[in-house]
Image (tube, rainbow, N blue to C red):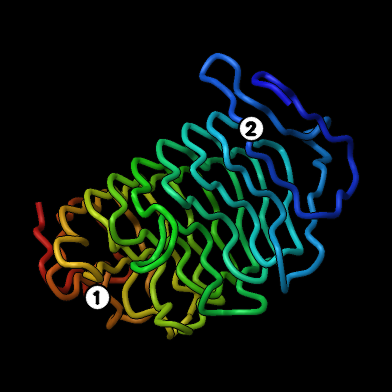
Amino acid sequence: MVPGKRIVLAPGTYIGSFSSTVKGTAQQPIVIESQDPVNPAIISGYSIGSGYSLRIQGDYWLIRHLKFTNAQKGILLDNANYSRITDVEVYNIGYEAVHFRDGTSNSIIENSRIHNTGKTGPGFGEGVYVGSAEGASYNQNTHYNTIRNVVFGPNITAEHIDIKERSIGTLVENCTFYGEGISGANYADSFIDVKGNNAVIRNNTAYQNGNNVIIDAFQLHEIVPGWGINNTFTGNTVYLSDPAVYVIGAYNNTSATASQNTRSPAGNMYKGNVTVQ
């Protein structure tokens, strides 16, 4: 396979754990897509207990108009910079659906749907996971990734988005979060958990859906000193049926700025070091 390669899948189900280490270029990305976007091909792992549907370890990939299912992990981007996932559906996954990992930076997931994760490990069933936990063997410098116009839920058992420590500049915008199914396992009690710096969370809509596990719509945590700071939340609309649930909870030494966020019905807004502008 070479830069500029286009992989076109006819309608049907393709079973296996598929991977590539080939790199595209800015002028010649590698494309994997469905022949018929209306009837997308399904990439299925062997079981929700092991493996992945697709793992990319090269820059400049375009993954579009596909479905991913029946694997422990859905899509892994490992050191896969300047890559784009668009118009996909990821569902029935054992752990997390999509992972930007091992230094993956300047990559995007957009116009997609993620639901029914954490089937074998509810505490590890994130929708999109950015970076890696402290102590992991992967490069934690996973920066400037974008999550845009993605519908999360129902039945995402952990956080819909988990932005790990040492990740910088993650952008989350125009997404919709349905809280039914967030489990509380492994402290999963919010739609977004920010442990990195300089994230921008804007123009999203979240629904508690009567899930009393949810403590805050958005949380910030300090796992590593100096991280979990300078994050921005603006223009978000959250529908929280429990008035005790906060829109933003900033814990430990974390910090955020907030502007033009709307809570319906009225109730708790901000907790911790949140500067309202």
Contact check, label 1 and label 2, Cβ < 8 Å: no
Q: Callout 2: 10 Å neighbours few (<14), some, many (20+)?
A: some
Q: Name the residue under label 1.
A: 267
Up the image or down, 42 lies above or below 49; here it is: above
Tell me the element at label 1. loop
Up the image or down, 250 lies above or below 58; here it is: below
Of 50 and 10, which appears nearest the observer?
Answer: 50
Q: Which residue lies furthest to the front in this view?
A: 137
Up the image or down, 190 lies above or below 89; here it is: below
Q: Where is residue 228 in the image (x, y as percent from the top left)?
A: 21, 62
Q: Position of residue 49 (x, y in %)?
A: 72, 74
Q: In this rendering, would 244 be left or right of 89?
A: left
**Residue 145, which numbered label?**
none
Up the image or down, 14 lies above or below 144; here it is: below
Q: Distance between the residues labelled 1 and 2?
A: 51 Å
Q: Where is residue 257 in the image (x, y as percent from the top left)?
A: 15, 55
Residue at 39%, 45% in the rendered image: 173
Q: Name the residue under label 2.
A: 22
Which quarter of the image is occupied by the N terminus?
Answer: top right
Tell me the element at label 2. loop
Residue at 86%, 49% in the rendered image: 14
Q: In this rendering, would 23 be left or right of 228?
A: right
Q: Position of residue 154 (x, y in %)?
A: 59, 68
Q: In this rendering, would 26 be left or right of 114?
A: left
Residue at 79%, 34% in the rendered image: 34
